[in-house]
Amino acid sequence: MMLCSGYMAPECAIYGLFSVKSDVFSFGVLLLEIISGKKNRGHQYNLIELAWRLWNQEMALELIDTLVEDSCILPEIFRCIHVGLLCVQQLPDDRPNMLSVVMMLSGESALPQPKQPGFLIEVHNEGHPSSSKNESCSANEMTVTLLEAR
């Protein structure tokens, strides 16, 4: 089950809670889109999930668009991916504020390890047992309306 679509932070999609950390989430998605040359389409194509998987497999180079790779310094691009993943962490309190993001992007100091991004949850159905370690989970329905300009 998807928690967010496109640029929407999970807490916005589920609870309708908006904050400056919601904007940080959106910025992280935008950063990952620029680096990859791909648009995050939520359930159709989840760029956040792909970036997280490649980062954890130490294959982040595969995320980088060839045009970006050819024109940039790789350690700087890896740093941008790292910061992007910090921005899209599941919990708003785990995300940096924008001042910290600017400092991270412009500095060379060590960055904290990103935690799981806000891109999906595991839903346990009675008819479909899961191998997840988390035994208790509830499923909720929601409707998200996306407005597009003409």
Image (tube, grey):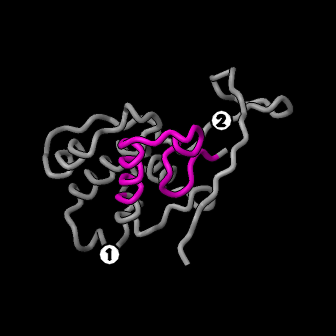
Query: In terms of image quadrants, where is residue 88?
Result: top left
The numbered dot on residue 67 is 1
**Is residue 11 rendered to the left or right of residue 61?**
right
Look at discs 1 and 2 and give the one toward the viewer. Answer: 2
Report the residue at 61% width, 37% height from top.
Answer: 121
Q: In the displayed structure, would residue 103 be above or below residue 92?
A: below
Report the residue at 48% width, 55% height from top.
Answer: 7
- Classify 10 Å Cα crowding around label 2: few (below 14), some (14-19), many (20 and above): few
Q: Residue 134 at what x, y percent from top left? A: 63, 23
Looking at the figure, which quarter contains the N terminus? top right
Kind of residue at badge 1 = Leu
Q: In the displayed structure, would residue 136 be above or below residue 10?
A: above
Looking at the figure, which quarter contains the C terminus? bottom right
Q: Secondary structure at mark 1?
A: helix
Kind of residue at badge 2 = Glu
Residue closest to the eye, 97 or 60: 97
Q: Residue furthest bottom?
A: 150
Q: Residue 109 at what x, y percent from top left? A: 14, 40
Q: CA distance from mark 1 to mark 2?
A: 36 Å
**Is residue 12 rendered to the left or right of residue 108?**
right
Query: In terms of image quadrants, where is residue 142?
Result: top right
Q: Residue furthest top?
A: 135
Q: In the displayed structure, would residue 129 be above or below residue 99?
A: above
Q: Which residue is mark 2?
A: 122
> Who comes first in sequence, dot 1 or dot 2?
1
**Magenta segment:** 2-31
Q: Mostly what secondary structure, the magenta segment? A: helix
Q: Residue 83 at what x, y percent from top left? A: 30, 47
The numbered dot on residue 81 is none
Report the residue at 50% width, 51% height from top.
Answer: 8
